Amino acid sequence: MSVDKDFVLNALLRHNYLPMQKRDREEVPPVFSSESFSPDVAHKLVQTQQRNVSIGWDAIEYRLTRFNGVSRSLAIPHPLAYAHLCLCIHENWEHLDYIEKNETSLIRPHQHKDGRLIIMDYEESIEKAQRSADLGFGRRFLVHTDILNCFPSIYSHAIPWATVGFAHAKAHKPPKHKAEWFNQLDEKLRWMKRNETQGVAIGPATSNVLSESILAKVDEALNKDFVFVRFIDDYTAYCRTEDESQEFIRRLAEELSKYKLLLNIGKTKTLPLPQAAAADWVSRLALAVPKGDEVNAYDAASFLDFAIELAKSEPDGSVLKYAVKPLVRKKLDFAADWYVLPQVLSLSFHQPVLLPLLASLLEKTLLPPPFRYSEELHTLAIENTRFRRSDGMCWTLYLLNKYEVKIKDELADQVKESKDCLGLILLYLSGQPEHQERVVDFAKSLDPADRYDLDQYWMLLYQLFLDGRIGNPYSDEKAFPVLKEEGVSFLAGATP
């Protein structure tokens, strides 16, 4: 079934704006939401008085931590720039809907029941095994490769090249043909990133749509000669001979280069078939998961010990996260509950990716007052703040707020020093007057003449504007007043 264009707009604005593309929305704490950012609001927003668009807008940076401790930067674009791009995609969906039909791509637009257009989780092991068996039948070699820095490398002008073809795009360039729909897409994409031509924001689903518009054309050029699938920017090809595998690599590099993208040679490898559909550590963990509907303390302890040892020998795998997830989803008996929770709390110090799972454990475990883990959460928060890990900082602040733990001055000072936008919002949401003053002072210290500096904190500034703590920081722009008049909040369940 084709995706309805109105569903596309609603999804991009209300469900796929903030970085929540994992199935469990684990990237940011659930206190954040864009559900009130409706299509009607977007239409009103783009009609407001706004800045000289030639300079574009900047975005909030949100640093997401991988299991190995390395962070990658996600972006939350300014709502006015984002509204322009979403409306442009909506108005021209009939030119872009070919990406829905590209069966080579494992991540493509779909009308998900929760309202999202894009969900970026890996497929289940059984599905992957079945697909590998089907595509690999009669073939002897497997090629794994990906695109080098895919999203940061996307060239905005490549979108017209892909959507209407090189010859037509080059014959219809701005400024003479600025109004052409494909040039409008190019322009609106650049507006979200300081009007720069290089890179798309990682986080909002608009970037998935536009990257797919390019990569679907790469796939199309190769489909008639090769058998392969693509998961975002990762390619897996099934080849009859080693020569064919080398030809796939050569041709893929050639097609990508047409759009100014590079193959990641360091991650390119050819392997003999058959190959296991899942990594060895995944299979070993799956076999070790405690059986039954309810898990006792002994089984939970044995399983976590096994996972911790396995993680030492598999530094390139998200072993601990993979192990904790099934425990969170199962029913734990009373003793197991009280064993697993402190274990995951301790492991979260080493791997902040476990913090969303810790939040789930705390929620399902009975915690009679007083809250028992305030010191541990403070330690975790300070550690993540020190390393400028947005997700680790935000999840711990969220938990401290949820369980009404008073935030210590040392942590508050470090959050302010980190200059992390969402971290500062959560510090403000603690409700502690002295910390709220810290946050307001930080907001007032921003240079009102530096629009990019303001854009990097737009959500914080908007919340303070909603609460009447500051005036409109964009004194000659009307986006914030319109959002307020339309009842938009970027906090879940909040009303202005």
Image (cartoon, helix red, strand yellow):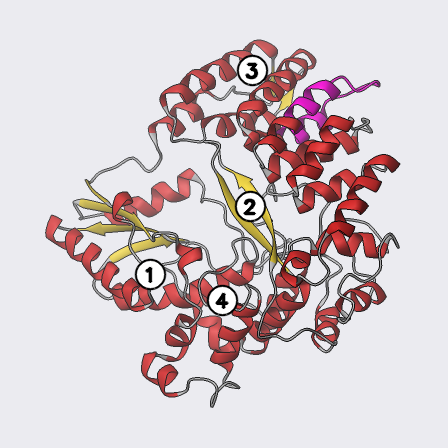
Q: Earlier in the sequence, mark 2 or mark 1?
A: 2
Residue 261, label in figure = 1
Q: Are marks 3 and 2 in contact (CB under 8 Å)?
A: no
Q: Amino acid at mark 4?
A: Glu
Q: How many C-alpha atoms fall within 10 Å of the one at disc 1: few (<14), some, or many (≥20)?
A: many
**Residue tagged 3:** 300
Q: How many C-alpha atoms fall within 10 Å of the one at disc 3: few (<14), some, or many (≥20)?
A: many
41 and 266: which is toward the camera: 266
Residue 22, label in figure = 2
104 and 438: which is toward the camera: 438
Mark 4, mark 2: which one is toward the viewer?
4
Give the image location of residue 43, x and y in percent.
71, 75
Q: Main secondary structure of the magenta part?
A: helix
Q: Earlier in the sequence, mark 3 or mark 4?
A: 4
**Mark 4 to mark 2 CA distance (whole Å):** 28 Å
Give the image location of residue 326, x and y in percent.
55, 28
Q: Earlier in the sequence, mark 4 or mark 2?
A: 2
Left or right, 252 with respect to 10, comes to left
| SS under mark 1 | loop
